[in-house]
Image (cartoon, rainbow, N blue to C red):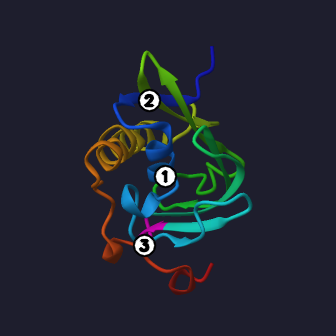
Amino acid sequence: MSDDFTTSFTVDQSPAEAFAAITNPRGWWSEAIEGGTEKLGDEFFYSNGDTHYCTMRLTEVVPDQRVVWHVVDNHFEFTNDEREWVGNDITFEVRTVDGETQVQFTQHGLVPEYECFNVCKNAWTGYINASLKSLISMGKGAPNPRESGRSRASLGV
């Protein structure tokens, strides 16, 4: 069994609706995301002020089924290894289970040995199981507001 962080939930909405929400992280993760978030090869930048910023590249996109983000670059202000996520893959699997749509999130490489594991696990649990699920099921997520992020240019990256 893998120690990679994973979490999942089910909703009544279709796989297409779940997939559309996943590929709209501005609607559930952060309104300040810069760049493309939907197509193979798209690259986007996430920032939560100076505390955490990263660059993700979409390396696999199977409509209504699977999206993979590859962590190209990462910076944590609160860990000894600020680049802890670099090289991780973050997968979103969408499937039908017993007539419902299941969304499974896994960050391959986010393991208990990581210094950020508990903080990151708690953050992802909120973003995925609360905000993303709400965006899919109720049409509105709870992303970080635009003003909590910083632009790539302002961070000098």
Question: How much space separates mark 3 and mark 2, taking CA atoms?
Answer: 28 Å
Report the residue at 56% width, 79% height from top: 152
Q: In the rendered image, which quarter is residue 37 located in?
A: bottom right
Question: How much space separates mark 1 and mark 2, taking CA atoms?
Answer: 13 Å
What x and y, as percent, mark residue 129?
Answer: 34, 37
Q: Which residue is mark 1?
A: 20
What x and y, as percent, mark residue 150?
Answer: 44, 77
Q: Residues within 10 Å of mark 1 (few under 14, many from 20)?
A: some
Q: Work out whether 156 lies above or below 73.
A: below
Q: What is the secondary structure assignment of the residue under circle 2?
A: strand
Q: In the drawing, does residue 48 fall left or right of residue 139?
A: right
Q: In the rendered image, which quarter is residue 93 located in?
A: top right
Mark 3 vs 2, N-terminal side? 3
Q: Which mark is residue 32?
A: 3
Please report the bounds of the magenta region as a residue range: 47-51
What x and y, as percent, mark residue 31?
Answer: 38, 69
Q: Is residue 112 visible?
A: no
